[in-house]
Amino acid sequence: MKTYGLNGFLVHKYKELISTNSKAAEYGYNEIQDKTLIITPKQTGGRGQGTNKWESETGKNLAFSMIFKPEQSFSAVNQFAISMAVSLACRNAISAYADDCTIKWPNDIYVGDYKIGGILIENKIVSNYVMTSVCGVGLNVNQKLFSENIPNPISLYMILDKELPLKKLLSEILDNMNITYPQIYTPDYLLSDYLSVLYRREGLYKWRDVNGMFLASIEGVDEYGRLVLTDTRGEQRVYGFKEVEYIIGDKCL
């Protein structure tokens, strides 16, 4: 392991890991400092949300986890603010290279209708307060080809037709993180920025829930991070994570 500082973060770089989030979970509370970053060029079992896997060609993309230790009074009620802060930092950095870069609720990073990044956040909550937050980030940077079973991937290389230095992009993400992270204590400011760059923020689109397909527009996101939709009958529908799917073409995402 190599340890160094980068833009206010303490970086632990490993040659190879199964998962950066899994490695972060091995650290005890007193072993880590706020704004610790774990990164590797080779992640053999990257995890996405639920049972999803994250594909990343060795040395071509960014795969890292940031560990945060919020103030001990940071309520678990506001934990979605961490998700907004991380997704905004990643989106804002990537938007310098790619037009139409948005956040697909709750925290996927999209360019157009294609996924360029995913975020997995695992919070440790004690007595209704967030003690630590492990934020795993996977971003497609220089990878040229992806497996056919991945629905809609894209990388910065596919957009720009050239490779980007990984450390430069990481540094730019951390610069943005230093702006958004302090705002978790004032989540209304984060929410305004988050909604402004939300994927499919305007317009009527197809969705699917347990009852089938329907048309709706995004009304917003509530204080718990749930997606609020308004359907064609004017009725509001509120969904937690994995309770509703986007329909893009003939695919549910």
Image: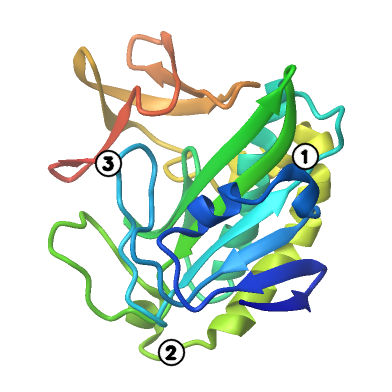
Image quadrant in which the N terminus is located: bottom right
Q: Are marks 2 and 1 in contact (CB under 8 Å)?
A: no
In the displayed structure, 90 sits above or below 232; it is below
Label 1 CA crowd tier, 10 Å (few <14, some 14–19, many 20+): many
Identify the secondary structure beneath mark 3: loop
Apparent side of residue 226 relative to residue 37 in the rendered image (left or right): left
Identify the secondary structure beneath mark 2: loop
* Residue 2 locus on image (x, y percent): 65, 80
State the residue position of label 2.
163
Three-letter code, disc 2: Glu
Would you say residue 95 is visible in this rendering?
Answer: no
Q: Residue drawn 68% across and 47% down?
A: 85
State the residue position of label 3.
253
Image quadrant in which the C terminus is located: top left
Apparent side of residue 98 relative to residue 74 in the rendered image (left or right): left
Identify the secondary structure beneath mark 1: helix
Q: Residue drawn 73% across and 48% down?
A: 68
Three-letter code, disc 3: Leu
* Residue 105 locus on image (x, y percent): 47, 39
Three-letter code, disc 1: Ile
* Residue 25 locus on image (x, y percent): 57, 47
